Image: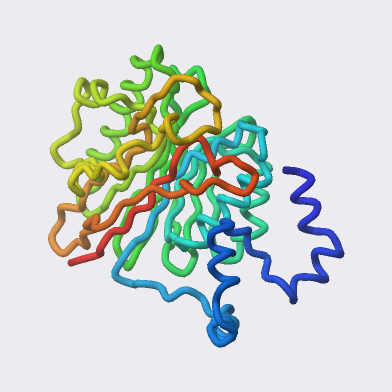
Amino acid sequence: MEGVCAAEESPERESNRHESEESPPVSSAHVGGESQASSQVSDESAESKNKQPEEDVDHLKLISFNVDGLDGEMQPERARGLCSCLTSHSPDVVLLQELIQPYVRFLKKRFAIDYMFIEAGKEHYFTGMMLKKSRITLLDSEIVSYPASQMLRNLLIAQVLFEGQKLHLMTSHFESCKDNSVERMRQLRLVMKRMREAPDDVIVLFGGDTNLRDYEVAKVGLPSSVNDVWEQLGEQEACRYTWDTQTNTNKGIRFKCRLRFDRLYLRQASSDGALQLNPDHMSLTGMEMLDCGRYTSDHWGIYCTFSAVC
């Protein structure tokens, strides 16, 4: 990763910037599709190449993704895969888990102009957020510790404005491994408490790698004001499993395991006249195998859109 970052700053790279935009590589299938386009279509594409994607002011677009920064295998290629994912969806909010500093530097080189970065740590691995500057106004941020965590886990909260509405964004990476169920449920209780106790005029949106099993959620219980967004959207099977060793071969795990580790939780504002964020679409991202033969992460990311209504 350090070598890739250095290469991005090389004179040769700089001289080629005008010939080729500094965008991450796309999948081979996408490239193949472009190569078959007619010259007329190519000309039209070139003409619109520099146009920024139109922003839908009535929607909030969000990605939550555990990027598996601790896995050193094909790390530069996978980091480019993450950049490609973000460029493709152009989300307003990005919630990232298992970041490491080289990943952060890599992302900032490409997105610092358009996004503000918030990190819940500087050493080892940590969570972070990317907030689109043209859409999200950062008011404040907070890191809440999990006192009993043995894995450096915490809760990152950003207090922001979206379309004039107060919004608390949260992300976390709950304690891993089946044996740490007690601590994981303790962390879920803390998050639910913070969501429930937020002011009435604030929307609260949590996304992250919870490592939760369904029986743990059932044991803790969700406040009546908090919804699991996947359930709210009809429990679509296509985006149920975000950790799926049956399809994702990054870890080379022999046994097949499919779990919904990555989750989104939403609490609406209840005060009169407050904006509401209604989820209207969810899908998984990062499911395309990269040219290096690996996926962007051992997790699939969650891409979700919300309609903003009064």
Seen in the picture, residue 178 relative to 116 is either above or below; the reply is above
Seen in the picture, residue 71 relative to 229 is either above or below; the reply is above
**Extreme-right residue of the structure:** 11
Front position in the image: 106 or 38:
38
Left or right: where 8 falls relative to 204: right
x and y percent of residue 212 in the render? 33, 27
Residue 147 can be seen, yes or no:
no
x and y percent of residue 193 in the render? 26, 33
Front position in the image: 119 or 212:
212
x and y percent of residue 64 in the render? 42, 46
Q: Residue 48 occupies which quadrant of the picture? A: bottom right
x and y percent of residue 214 in the render? 25, 26
Image quarter hosting the N terminus: top right
Front position in the image: 178 or 42:
42
Image quarter hosting the C terminus: bottom left
Residue 49 can be seen, yes or no:
yes
Left or right: where 88 falls relative to 204: right
Question: At 60% across and 66% down in the image, what residue appears?
Answer: 113
Q: Residue 12 occupies which quadrant of the picture? A: bottom right
Question: At 15% across and 52% down in the image, what residue appears?
Answer: 270
Left or right: where 62 falls relative to 240: right
Front position in the image: 154 or 41:
41
**Type of colouring:** rainbow
Query: Total label count?
Result: 0
Question: At 30% across and 39% down in the image, what residue appears?
Answer: 240
Seen in the picture, residue 39 relative to 34 is either above or below; the reply is below
**Extreme-top residue of the structure:** 179
